[in-house]
Image (cartoon, rainbow, N blue to C red):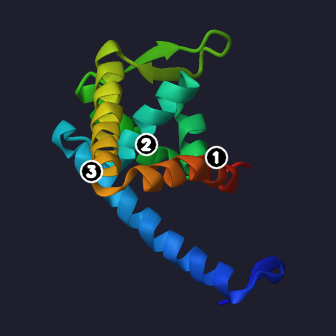
């Protein structure tokens, strides 16, 4: 394993362990929202529309690094379930903007709540009070790792 920036072997080992643990955590969070019957790609699109607002198909495809055809397939499934809706672009009539429907906002909220409920329960039942404090203190550090 290369140690970028002169990091020692303990940093490399920590990076490997964090990668494994974060992958397992993400899988558990996906399972927590499984009852909503949305695929991971659909969940990502709903989340992006929820956080960034209406977007064109091309913008969504670029943001998710997929081909526009793949994004159209994902959006078609979401639209068939009434989770997204289309509207004319206000300045470019050649484009269509995709946004969350009221139902889509509800499903997104349910997905977030299911994941947060599972995580809160796991933290409360599997970690001591001191461990909970340590985890809470580490959250800003983890957030800095993913900042652009």
Q: Can you name the residue that lies furthest to the right here?
A: 5
Label disc, if present, on residue 44 of the rendered structure: 2
Instruction: Give the crowd class for mark 1: few <14, some 14-19, many >=20 residues within 10 Å.
Output: few
* Relative vertical location of residue 37 with respect to residue 103 in this rendering, above or below: below
User: Horizontal and vertical percent for residue 21?
Assistant: 43, 68
Please give the name of the residue rendered at 54% of the width and 21% of the height, measured from the top-left corner. Answer: 54
Residue topped by disc 3: 125
The mark that comes first in sequence, 2 or 3, is: 2
User: Horizontal and vertical percent for residue 45?
Assistant: 44, 38
Please give the name of the residue rendered at 59% of the width and 43% of the height, measured from the top-left corner. Answer: 63
Please give the name of the residue rendered at 58% of the width and 76% of the height, measured from the top-left corner. Answer: 14
Q: Is residue 73 visible?
A: no
The mark that comes first in sequence, 1 or 2, is: 2
Quarter holding the N terminus is bottom right
Instruction: Give the crowd class for mark 2: few <14, some 14-19, many >=20 residues within 10 Å.
Output: some
Instruction: Indicate the secondary structure of the residue bearing disc 1.
Output: helix
User: Horizontal and vertical percent for residue 27?
Assistant: 33, 59
User: Horizontal and vertical percent for residue 120?
Assistant: 33, 42
Label disc, if present, on residue 33 of the rendered structure: none
Residue topped by disc 1: 140
**Alpha-carbon span between mark 3 and mark 1:** 22 Å
**Alpha-carbon span between mark 1 and mark 2:** 23 Å
Disc 2 to disc 3: CB gap under 8 Å? no
């Amino acid at each position: 394993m290369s140690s970028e920036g002169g990091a020692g072997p303990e940093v490399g080992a920590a990076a490997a362990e964090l990668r494994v643990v974060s992958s397992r955590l993400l899988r558990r969070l996906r399972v927590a929202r499984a009852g909503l019957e949305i695929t991971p790609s659909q969940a990502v699109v709903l989340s992006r529309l929820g956080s960034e607002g209406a977007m064109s198909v091309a913008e969504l495809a670029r943001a998710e690094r997929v081909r526009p055809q793949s994004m159209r397939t994902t959006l078609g499934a979401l639209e068939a379930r009434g989770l997204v809706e289309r509207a004319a672009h206000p300045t470019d009539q050649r484009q269509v903007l995709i946004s969350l429907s009221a139902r889509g906002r509800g499903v997104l909220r349910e997905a977030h709540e299911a994941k947060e409920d599972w995580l809160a329960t796991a933290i409360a039942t599997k970690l001591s009070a001191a461990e909970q404090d340590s985890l809470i203190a580490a959250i800003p550090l983890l957030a800095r790792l993913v900042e652009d």
